[in-house]
Amino acid sequence: MTLDREELLRMYRTMVCVRQFETLAGEYFAAGKIPGFIHLSIGQEASSVGVCSALRSDDFLTTTHRGHGHLIAKGADLDRMVAELLGKRTGYCKGKGGSMHIADFALGILGANGVVAGGLPLAVGAGLSIKLRKTDQVVVSFFGDGASNRGPVHEAMNMAGIWRLPVIFCVENNGYASTTPVARACSVPDLALRAAGYGMPGVTVDGNDVLAVREAADQAVARARAGQGPTFLENKTYRIRGHFEGDPQKYREEAEVQAWRDKNDPLQRFAAVLRKGNVLTQDLQQGIWDEVEAQIGQALAFAEQSPYPEPKEALEDLLVNP
Amino acid sequence: MAERRLSASAALAEALREEMTRDETIFILGEDLVSHSGIFGQFKGIPENFPGRIIDAPISETCVAGCGVGAGLTGMRPLVDFHFSDFVTCAMDELCNQAAKIRYMFGGQVKLPLVVWCPDGAGLRAAAQHSQSLEAWFVHTPGLKVVVPSEPADVKGLIKSSLRDDDPVMFFQHKRLFAKEGPVPEDADFIIPLGQAAIKRPGADLTFLTYGSGYHLCLQAAEELAAQDILAEIVDLRTLKPLDMETVAHSIQNTNRAVVVHEACVTGGFGAELAARIQVELFDYLDAPVLRVGAKDVPIPFSPVLEDYVLPSVAEVIEAARAVTYR
């Protein structure tokens, strides 16, 4: 293990933060406090934290409708995130985006995207921009197994491949594209096999093992920074919640979900490793959970107390020069 | 001093060279650009003078457009060449769901400088998938600006404004007009602000509201009408969004009659929007219904006899002018 204690604890804490954020978002949604619909990433925390912890703050990221975890792991502000989920003026997008459209350009977060696979061409553009501006930044584009079958993915991976752009295509294979099992929608069992067609390495990792993800991400980032081009990283994971909150989930058995929850929870797995390595004690673990709970409680209070935008603010922010 | 004349292609290339010299963040991305300096010669002088800043992409319109968005969000000013405007259909998500919405959706956090350059229009016997005029689709998408120049000087002035603008711009340039020459100022600082129409021919009897290739139909029609003592004023809109309604109003207040002329098919075209606004904002000034002249509501057919029949003609423009002047 080459990561120091501080970094390991930071990663664990971020995973706890994603878990608690998503859990509370689910509760708030069920209570009718979050309008629209939300997609939670519970069970996929090792992927978001494993990858994003390998990035610098000036690196770029695009994410998806299931993007809360990536945003948190890239350092997004919880107050502004919750406020956006609630449609408040103090939210990241002043209430214009909601759960599926949060961005923080100061942190290189080029946005969550409501269109499946919508972020990949943008990520390639950011990669081209890096190349033209001659910096050593990298871009990570998260997408799902469902997105992997869309045309823009093919174009994006090919373009990044021919130009050797510093883009990491990170597919989170969580077993289901909405309601469709991956085996019924994808032509290969490991999506990383597709990387060969675009002249880039493809790596499949246990996406619920945060250290395995981190190691693969470190290698991909190093390649990209060194000008060696893109990498396709497949994190095999599992979506514990439905596609959206309220999803009746008729496409899978509860026992399947329960088995993942009991035997393959990324937080429990990481905690066990940290406990075994004497990095984490029970007290420290409890302390982290309490501290995160307080932080998220604060974010919720901030968001609840924040005002809604004035209706006419709907007409603002369209153009720089109207 | 003799007026300098350039083709629309040369005007575009000159403007791009001037802007790329002025601003290092501008680059051009598209298909088949470098070896021929663009399939219409529109990027003449750029590959040799700006190596690495004009980039050949694979045939991947979706990702080319998305690449423009991603680069525009991260410090560059891309011009994306669409080869034929018809291929925007392959990138409607990138243009209408991403480029148009990103600033708004994210609460104004970011600007997106991006010019999407689209050679459009019919008359080259190129049939249904290489001949369209699709500007109205983008006028109907909040978050995009839409520019349709008709003459070489407009091309130069408007492409420079578009490249300097901080919002995404759809720039439609008619393929049949690339070789057509006109006077073009040599001044490197010559710009035409977006949202500024021009009264290009004064007349007291009626107003032609037009843009792009429609302008040239109106010009011919106005000549013939003048021989019949009907004096048509021509307002070249140049930018459809933002729209210079002030100049439109000024003209109609003088002539009290208007005909909208565009090459796009009539139904749901920009003429419909214009006619609607005119009847609301200028009702009291109108002495006749606003008429529209455009292509018939079918795809553009191949055979010359069919294509010519479908496209708007000078005769139809004259007929509409006579109808609104009751002469």
Image: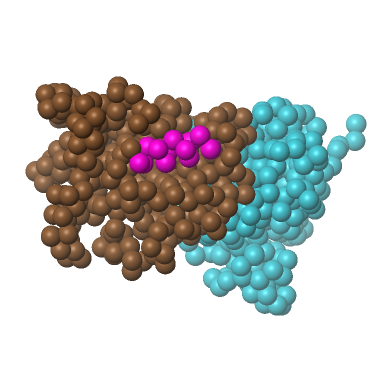
Q: Classify residue B44 by image quadrant.
A: top right
Horizontal side, residue A309 vs residue B223: left or right: left
Q: Quadrant of residue B122?
A: bottom right
Residue closest to the eye, A128 or A287: A287
**Please, is residue B89 above or below residue B23 in the view?**
below
- Asked whether, in this view, residue B96 is left or right of residue A52, the answer is right
In the rendered image, what is the letter of the chain coloured cyan? Answer: B
Q: Position of residue A2 (x, y in %)?
A: 38, 29
Residue A193 placement (x, y as % from top left): 47, 58
Judged left or right of residue A156, residue A61 is left
Q: Is residue B319 above or below residue B239?
A: below
* Nearer to the camera, B72 or B315: B72
Which residue shows up at 52% across the image and 31% down it? A137
The secondary structure making up most of the magenta span is: helix
Q: How many marks?
A: 0
Q: Is residue A296 left or right of residue A10?
A: left
Q: Quadrant of the N terminus of chain B?
A: top right
Which quadrant of the structure image shows residue A180?
Answer: bottom left
Image quadrant in which the C terminus of chain B is located: bottom right
Q: Residue at x 55, y 29 (%)?
A: A136
Chain appearing in brown on the rendered image: A
In the rendered image, is residue A175 in sight? Answer: yes
> A58 or A298, which lies in front?
A58
Magenta-highlighted residues: A212-224
Query: Looking at this rendering, what residue extends furthest in the left direction?
Result: A31
